[in-house]
Amino acid sequence: MALDLSYNKYSDVSYDEKERLFEECKADDRWSHVLYGCYECGICVAACPSARFYDFSPRIIAQAAAREDVDLVYTLMNDSVWDCSQCFSCDRCPRQNSPGQIITVMREVAVRNGLQTAKKALEGYGRIIYKIMSTGSQVSPDMLQPNAFPDWGGHVGEISDNLEVWRKALPPETLHTTETGWVVDDKTIIELYLIWHMTGVMDMIESIDEGLHMILVDVMEEKLEEAGYDVTFD
Amino acid sequence: MIHLPVVKANGRTFKANPDEAPTHDLRDEIFQLEKEGEWEVMRVPEPYMEVMTKYGRTKKIPVEKTWHHKSCGQCGHIPGYSTSIFWLNREFGLDYHDPTDQTSCTAWNYYASATSNPAAQAAVAMRNFAAAHEVGYFPLIHCGTSFGHYKEVRHALVHQHDLRRKVRDILKRLGKKLVIPEEIVHYSEWVLAMRHRIAERQVIDMSNITATVHPACHYHKLIEEDAIYDSEIYGAQRTAIVTSTLEALGITVGDYSTWYDCCGFGFRHILVSRDFSRSFSVKRKIEKMIEEVNPDITVTHDTGCVTTLDQSQFAGKAHGCKVGLPVMADSQVAALAMGAHPYKVLQLHWHNTDNKPFLEKIGIDYEQKWREFEAEVAKIKAGEKEFMTWDDAK
Ligand code: SF4
Ligand code: SF4
């Protein structure tokens, strides 16, 4: 889809609001280490996989951020940043920028502020967030279901049909699991939940998916309580 | 076929000189911060091996006493990847620890959804490092993204006092010390450093094999100075990782024009926008490799790369693209060379693209091997045994 860089698309959002979000990006500790200006050389674009597939340009993002073009940054924060593959091929920028990391920061601001476009980009991703936050594993063997990966062909069905027994046919003792990649101690999970609690990560999840946040909080608070912690995520 | 180039200009090979490095050595600052009481540095246990990194500095790679920081994508979806790493350690009789007090780095989610922040990411990393320290083993990172991310975390912690303080407080509340490894080591660096010992024990001849290599972005593009380079491999103009290992095993490595390109994984894309991952992987990587090199196999060293390059070929086939190239990790190829079982150890039935022609070419009777695996599975199903053990996998 062609990227609309005219200033019309988000004209209903006030300049002050756009500026507030941009200031939030600039306030991030990383910002000054990942953006130093831009030569417009296009090296980042040449290296960028997403630029080959989408109407996407790390150069435009670095340019807009360096010029402090508040309107354009807002447009890109909505319509562009989620196309990035986060591969950091653009780290070979001769200006020592990291367009990929500029994007990481912009995405975090988009999530924290619950932008609709962030919610849309993460549609269908909720089950993964549930998995990573509750178990510390991003993916697990039981996710290999044919309906989740129809484009990977029949072998996914074969794995899911044989999952239990094929997991038992793995020599490392830690890998006989189906719901997590390996056996994880309860104590480890509790420590992970405490990290989420102390770093405010759950607030970010609430900004993009309240329902998911509620379910996760229930699961975590119950486990923490069982372990003797009186912790709430409110 | 394009043969492996050694880049030279006027007969001169380029030699990296650490005195001319454009960055200072982060390890100096890490030790300085230890002197100032900021944290404790985990030393690479002896005996260690030494390798050269991009700017000519030396990096220490532990031989053993390694704490295996597993990868959720490897263990979950391509478990023969990690099994092969463990198998290699066992074959050499090395002391290693496969922890249950370990979370993933959670960076896949971070790069996919941004539903986290630097303090949380650093705390997850440091919790894992502290867990390794408590049992006296040194972290060996299985995932390329965990490796790249932990290097970023280490860099941030060295340079951001506030972040360090915040993470130290979090760790304190977990009853843990702030400890930082002297080196962040990826398992493929261990495989590379061990390559001659692996080659000494090689029982499968692979000299008739041509491979292409895909280097993982997060291995050599994030904190690039920490990746392994070697003047004998690509004239030290590109990372030697994987290529050096395969050459030691007698495999011919072919070059191709999109070597530097990413695999198309995309973190978010591979899970919810796979049209991008499939297209990029097939059109920019697999087809180019086949057109320019026509290899027997492509070998890489990261979770996402094996997954994307392997799984994407199914849809590519439906679209009539040039596909059908088996994909494996370097640990699997190294284990196979030393005689590991293709199904009990490499667990190739979890892979997608047909790898039987490759097995046949190196003289492995894959039908017999599959029957042997099926016999183990039958015993588990019949309740004769609960699990397949390391002894069963011999
Ligand atoms: S590589 Fe750097 S300087 Fe060149 S266009 Fe991209 S961001 Fe700008
Ligand atoms: S990190 Fe994003 S912007 Fe940079 S090269 Fe990769 S896809 Fe392009």
Image (cartoon, coloured by chain):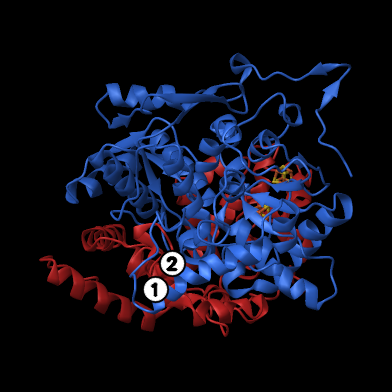
- The chain ID associated with circle 1 is B
Q: Residue at x 39, y 62 (%)?
A: A175
Quarter location, residue A195:
bottom left
In this view, B326 is above or below A79 = above
* Circle 1 crowding by C-alpha within 10 Å: few under 14, some 14–19, many from 20: some
Instruction: Give the SS element for disc 1.
Output: helix
* Residue A207 place in picture, x, y as percent: 41, 74
Name the residue carrying label 1: B380
Q: Residue at x 46, y 48 (%)?
A: B87
Task: From the image, state the color of chain B.
Answer: blue
* Residue B394 place in picture, x, y as percent: 47, 53
In this view, A80 is above or below B33 = below
Quadrant of the frame with the N terminus of chain B = top right
| The residue carrying mark 1 has its beta carbon less than 8 Å from ligand 2 | no
Is residue B340 visible from the viewing direction of this image? yes
* Residue B301 place in picture, x, y as percent: 59, 48
Name the residue nearer the viewer: B253 or A61: B253
Name the residue carrying label 2: A169
Q: Are marks 1 and 2 in contact (CB under 8 Å)?
A: yes
Residue B111 lies left or right of residue A193; in this view the side is right
Q: Residue at x 54, y 33 (%)?
A: B194
Q: Residue at x 60, y 56 (%)?
A: A86
Quarter, ligand 1? top right
Name the residue nearer the viewer: A172 or B383: B383
In this view, B204 is above or below B56 = below
> The residue under label 2 is which amino acid type?
Ala
Chain letter tied to red: A
| The residue carrying mark 2 has its beta carbon less than 8 Å from ligand 2 | no
